[in-house]
Amino acid sequence: MARAADLAGAAHLMLVDGVSYLDPEPAVFEAMLEGWTKQQRSRFLNWDGTIKPRLSLVRRFAEFTNQYPWQWQPAEVEAFIDHLRAKTPTFTVSSGRGYQNHLRLFCEYITDARYGWMNVCQERFGQVPVQILHEWNTVTHVSEYEGDPSRRPLTYDEIQALFDAADGRVEEIRKRGRKGALAAMRDSALLKSYYAYGMRRRESVHLDVADLRRNPKAPQYGRHGAVFVRYGKSSKGSPPKRRTVFTVPEMDWIVDVLDHYLTEVRPRFGAGKHPAIWVTERSGRLSRRSANEAFDAARKAADLPEELKLHCLRHSYITHLVEFDYPERFVQDQAGHVYASTTAIYTGVSDEYRNRLLQRKLTHRYPGIWEDPK
């Protein structure tokens, strides 16, 4: 058989020529995983976010089947997905598709003749790996949005109730003479900033004080005219995306909130020269988990539905910008979405807003006949 090309991850580069392994099956399997790792690294894919989870999944699948890749057949992957669905009630369609895609990619790698793994397996084991995932046994993508339906925008009343509850926690802690009032003040400002700028968790917790920007077109906001996001959601193989999120007039109350937090609250954490905006009692950067806990505590205090999560504030921001009649492109840029269709998925405008639009159109179409009811 022809020798494989000298590509990153090629079999002849992973296995030592002329060496007879005492236990060849696991040795070849580990060499495959090492080769796949090199192949992905050569594409500048992220280790923690992409490569490591993929390797872990392949190992889990191999353990489930008690077989090696050159023995796998479509029936094994079908049984694996069925097992995960039965074992984990929260196993979603999108999760299933992700697992299938990762296993498909691994099979594509070991069945690609350029990497030489089929030659190795044929010579050593008398079997060759095959692609086990096809159109007929994988999840079909029929909907634009398959996420959790509980991720909905909050109503204006729910937003107000959430913020009132977050502020109320500060007074409640003080009255009880307990520790934590300072952290509660930080959490209140944090949740308000999440909504006022529509950021993702990672984007917000990685904000530094230096990321606060002035907007020459809105000098009245001082250093809070915009926020420079440096850790936006990245595409696979690319660094985090960057964008500037402007402070909008309808949410300019955030200027006073941030100013109070930065001048009165944050210094009391003893952060010193730490660059982060959101800091902990131990003068470190706040974690995404702590941000989730801040939302959950306020949501519970406000007696809002349990299924609501922190990301709902981002949905709320995008929806409310639309309801404030900002152009679609502006909303898309503020949110950091590459495609307008993604922004549309986040949008869930209220019946009141749609009725206002309908009323406006009817009044314009039938002037003097149809009047706005007061």
Image (cartoon, rainbow, N blue to C red):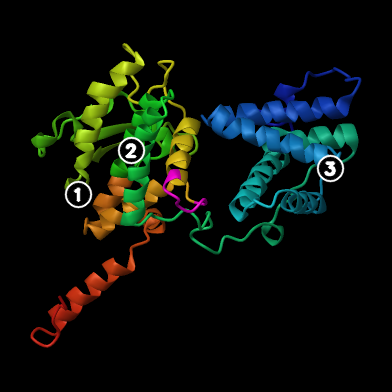
Marks 2 and 1, the one that precedes in the sequence: 2
Residue 231, visible in the rendered structure: no
Give SS at disc 3.
helix
Q: Is residue 193 magenta?
A: no
- List x then y, in percent, for residue 126: 90, 39
Q: Which secondary structure dominates the residues rendered in magenta?
A: loop
> Amino acid type of disc 2?
Asp
**Res 167 label:** 2
Q: Nearer the viewer, mark 3 or mark 2?
A: 2
Q: The magenta stretch spans which residues? A: 301-307
- List x then y, in percent, for residue 27: 82, 24
> Amino acid type of disc 1?
Glu
The answer to whether mark 3 and mark 2 are in CB contact below 8 A is: no
Decide: is 275 above or below 297.
above
Marks 3 and 1, the one that precedes in the sequence: 3
Residue 291: quadrant of the picture: top left
The residue tagged 3 is 65
Decide: is 364 above or below 90.
below
**Res 250 label:** 1
The residue under the point 90% across, 23% down is 23
Q: Is residue 53 left or right of residue 169?
A: right
**Front-lying residue, 137 or 154:** 154
